[in-house]
Amino acid sequence: MKSTRKGLRDGDLFKDTYERLNCADCEKVLKKQNDPDEVFAVRVCPECETRYKELR
């Protein structure tokens, strides 16, 4: 699982005009899943189910 920063650098993700993270393949806004026991949140594309981790 890549981090969101690495996804942005590699071109797998992009930010829209409202600074939301979008999947470059599907062009859908990523959804956030928070696990209170983890240090990071998981961002998931609703269409292709690609996962990225994001430090809080």
Image: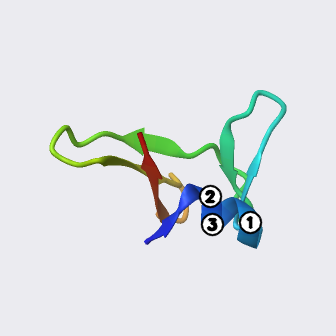
Q: Does residue 50 appear left or right of residue 37 in this picture? A: right
Marks 3 and 2 sit apart, C-alpha to C-alpha, by 4 Å
Dot 3 amino acid type: Lys
Q: Position of residue 17 (x, y in %)?
A: 84, 31
Residue designated by label 3: 6
Residue at the location (22% across, 48% down)?
A: 38
- In this view of the protein, which residue sits in the foreground, 10 or 29? 10
Q: Quadrant of residue 47?
A: bottom right
Q: Position of residue 51 (x, y in %)?
A: 45, 63
Q: Position of residue 36 (x, y in %)?
A: 19, 37
Quarter the N terminus occupies: bottom left
Residue at the location (62% across, 58% down)?
A: 5
C-beta proximity under 8 Å, tags 3 and 2: yes
Residue designated by label 1: 9
Dot 2 amino acid type: Arg
Quarter the C terminus occupies: top left
